[in-house]
Amino acid sequence: MEKPEKYKELSLMPALITCKCPRCRVGKVYEHGPYSLTNRKILPKCEHCSLIYEKEPGYFYAAMYVGYAFIVAELVTAALGTNILSGSDNPWVYLGIMLPLVAVLSPFNYRYSRILLLYFLTPGLRYHPEMS
């Protein structure tokens, strides 16, 4: 009698960072990179396990709250860093640093707020190593 094949466990962090499917951790969630000028949309479903990413219309509106937490953390860090490094009280110094930071990090926030929503905040969606 043959032993059942042990499934290959794929670790969480590499799958999360590379934006892989939360159920199988093999299929891509996005077709292009975060700073692609052509397309930043999520694929309709996983090409490996056929998980439909958008459960219902407007599902990713909840990702706005995660993105809000990202932007608050980034701006507080930038403000503290600016204060420590420059010691300036001039608000234009802070705006001159924070506004470009927001523009540069907005594709990152958009992408990973949705990924975190899929991985950690979606009820009933968990990793299935047998699908890897």
Image (cartoon, helix red, strand yellow):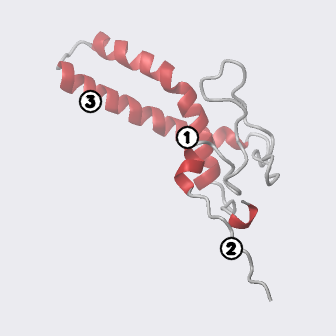
Q: Which residue is mark 3?
A: 80
Mark 2 surroundings within 10 Å by alpha-carbon count, few (fewer than 14), some (14 through 19), many (20 or more): few
The amino acid sitting under disc 3 is: Leu
Q: Residue at x 73, y 75 (%)?
A: 5
Closer-to-camera residue (121/126): 126
The amino acid sitting under disc 1 is: Tyr
Q: Estimate the x, y position of residue 95 in percent, counting from the top left.
A: 36, 15
Closer-to-camera residue (51/122): 51
Q: Estimate the x, y position of residue 116 in percent, counting from the top left.
A: 58, 47
Q: Secondary structure at mark 1?
A: helix
Q: Which residue is mark 2?
A: 6
Mark 1 surroundings within 10 Å by alpha-carbon count, few (fewer than 14), some (14 through 19), many (20 or more): few
Distance in Å between CA atoms under marks 1 and 2:
38 Å
Q: Residue at x 80, y 54 (%)?
A: 49
Distance in Å between CA atoms under marks 1 and 3:
23 Å
Q: Residue at x 19, y 26 (%)?
A: 84
Q: Which residue is mark 1?
A: 65
Q: Estimate the x, y position of residue 52 in percent, counting from the top left.
A: 80, 49
Q: Quadrant of the N terminus?
A: bottom right
Closer-to-camera residue (9/113): 9
